[in-house]
Image (spheres, rainbow, N blue to C red):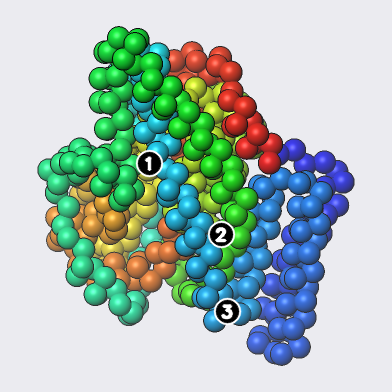
């Protein structure tokens, strides 16, 4: 999204007024006059941003504006903000109806449509190598960040309300459970439950079987899948018109439920995570993009919308259809997208793996347990294996964190503290997960020499023009 000088005339004053409003209320120390003045100035800033959105006539700025407005509503009227959650839930439900059919149709079309089974295997191997390298680097950066900040040292905080009950409900996760979880026992059940990896595995085998048939037998099913994928992209375009409302409602509920004050309570831990995520983006993702020849500016413009959705909703699935559409519009062939992004949702969760490294050492620091570098590296080696499939099982990040604590005989009480602000941390790590998987699809496409060589669907172009 290009920003002109005229746009800056609305964008900068709007952001400036919003920040001044926050500062005004903060300096007023709760005084009624300062609070009222702060609200007026902040809403004036939001109005300025809305003017910018009207000028742009695009969904991306409106999603950002809705996120800011939602945070303001959650801050000013937390009770009312709590009632808005239904709108974010509606948006998430509509998105979830898209994910499984879209993945299944695009995978089958990509494999059976080209008939190049060796090419599919080659893409799979390259993707897994890329995933393993990136997630290992994410673990290293998380480890270094928490050792520098020492966010857990000296902390003695009470358990978050309800945290003990939440942890007791979590079942242990073993490697054989995860391996079994990959393969579907009933494709209808997998689609109904939104099990992305299971749908992808079924799509791969179905596509291979279809590719082995004669053209006469393969043609009708292939055309059906091609039409279905186009319909689901069109479906995505329609649902995305509701995105600003869904994103704004999600942000309002988050701020209204947790409050902005929670940032002060555990600000050091939050800052450590977000600083580590930024470091990962600058020190790992950017060099990878430059080495692979990714058009960085075009990529950032393309990924801005799905990243914003992921941040506000803290749900990777909410951003998946738009992420696939944006990357196809950027030049990634659909058959590569259909494999890399679904697989990445289980094997390339850079933000989540970085968080696990940081949180594991935080637990030890908060408990006053000193771990040598050798012990920490051993813990990282364990996380390299146990962090795979974090998106495949509900609350699996918590499961992995608990399993790591048990393996290294760490207390679970500090995990209660992390749960208290987990929603805020989840927003950042989910955004990095989505951006990382989008980047992986572009890198693999460049690696295959197929970036920007296929014509882009008119439906996808139409969606990107909105």
384 vs 363, nearest the viewer: 384
SS at mark 3? helix
Checking the image for residue 80, the label placed there is 3
Q: Which of marks 1 and 3 is in front?
A: 1
- Residue sitting nearer the eye, 71 or 410: 71
Q: Residue at x 70, y 79 (%)?
A: 25
Looking at the rendered structure, the secondary structure element under dot 2 is: helix
Name which of mark 2 and mark 1 comes first in the sequence: 1
Neighbourhood count class around disc 1 (C-alpha, 10 Å): few under 14, some 14–19, many 20 upward: many
Q: In this view, does 173 lie to the left or right of 384?
A: left
Horizontal and vertical percent position of residue 451: 53, 19
411 relative to 58, above or below: below
Q: Name the residue under label 2.
A: 246
Q: Mark 1 points at which residue?
A: 100
The residue positioned 69% from the left and 50% from the top of the image is 61
Q: Can residue 144 be seen in this view?
A: no
**Closer to the camera in the image, 410 or 320:** 320
Q: Residue 122: which numbered mark, if any?
A: none
* 337 with respect to 306 (left or right): left
Q: Give the alpha-carbon distance from disc 1 to disc 3, as whole Å.
A: 33 Å
- Residue 11 locus on image (x, y percent): 78, 54
Decide which of tag 3 and tag 2 comes sooner along the chain.
3
Residue 101 drawn at (x, y percent): 40, 38
Q: Regarding mark 1 in the picture, which secondary structure is present there?
A: helix
In space, the residues marked 2 and 1 are separated at their CA atoms by: 20 Å
């Amino acid at each position: 999204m290009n920003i002109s000088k005229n746009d800056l005339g609305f964008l900068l004053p709007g952001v400036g007024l919003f920040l001044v409003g926050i500062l005004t209320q903060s300096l007023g120390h709760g005084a009624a006059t300062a609070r009222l003045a702060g609200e007026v100035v902040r809403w004036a800033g939001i109005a300025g941003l809305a003017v910018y959105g009207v000028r742009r006539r695009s969904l991306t700025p409106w999603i950002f504006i809705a996120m800011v407005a939602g945070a303001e509503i959650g801050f000013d009227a937390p009770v009312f903000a709590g009632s808005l959650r239904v709108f974010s839930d509606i948006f998430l439900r509509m998105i979830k109806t898209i994910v499984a059919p879209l993945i299944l149709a695009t995978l089958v079309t990509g494999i059976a449509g080209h008939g190049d089974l060796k090419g599919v295997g080659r893409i799979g191997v390259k993707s897994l190598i890329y995933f393993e390298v990136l997630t290992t680097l994410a673990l290293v950066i998380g480890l270094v960040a928490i050792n520098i900040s020492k966010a857990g040292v000296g902390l003695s905080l009470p358990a978050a309300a309800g945290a003990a009950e939440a942890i007791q409900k979590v079942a242990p996760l073993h490697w054989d459970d995860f391996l079994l979880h990959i393969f579907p026992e009933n494709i209808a059940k997998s689609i109904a439950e939104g099990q992305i990896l299971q749908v992808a595995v079924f799509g791969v085998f179905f596509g291979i079987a279809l590719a082995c048939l004669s053209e006469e037998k393969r043609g009708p099913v292939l055309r059906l899948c091609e039409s279905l994928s186009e319909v689901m992209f069109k479906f995505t375009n329609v649902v995305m018109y509701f995105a600003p409302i869904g994103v704004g409602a999600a942000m309002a509920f988050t701020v209204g439920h947790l409050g902005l004050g929670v940032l002060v309570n555990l600000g050091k831990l939050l800052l450590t995570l977000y600083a580590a995520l930024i470091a990962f983006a600058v020190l790992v993702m950017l060099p990878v993009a430059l080495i692979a020849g990714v058009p960085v500016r075009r990529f950032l413009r393309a990924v801005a919308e799905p990243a914003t959705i992921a941040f506000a909703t803290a749900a990777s699935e909410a951003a998946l259809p738009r992420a696939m559409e944006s990357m196809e519009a950027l030049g990634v062939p659909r058959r590569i997208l259909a494999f890399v992004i679904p697989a990445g949702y289980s094997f390339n969760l850079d933000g989540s793996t970085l968080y696990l490294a940081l949180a594991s050492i935080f637990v030890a620091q908060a408990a006053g347990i000193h771990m040598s570098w050798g012990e920490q590296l051993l813990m990282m080696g364990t996380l390299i294996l146990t962090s795979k499939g974090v998106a495949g099982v509900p609350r699996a990040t918590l499961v992995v964190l608990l399993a790591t604590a048990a393996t290294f005989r760490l207390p679970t009480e500090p995990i209660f503290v992390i749960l208290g602000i987990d929603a805020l941390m989840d927003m950042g790590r989910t955004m990095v997960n989505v951006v990382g998987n989008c980047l992986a699809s572009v890198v693999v496409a460049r690696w295959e020499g197929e970036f920007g060589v296929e014509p882009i669907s008119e439906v996808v172009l139409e969606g990107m023009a909105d």
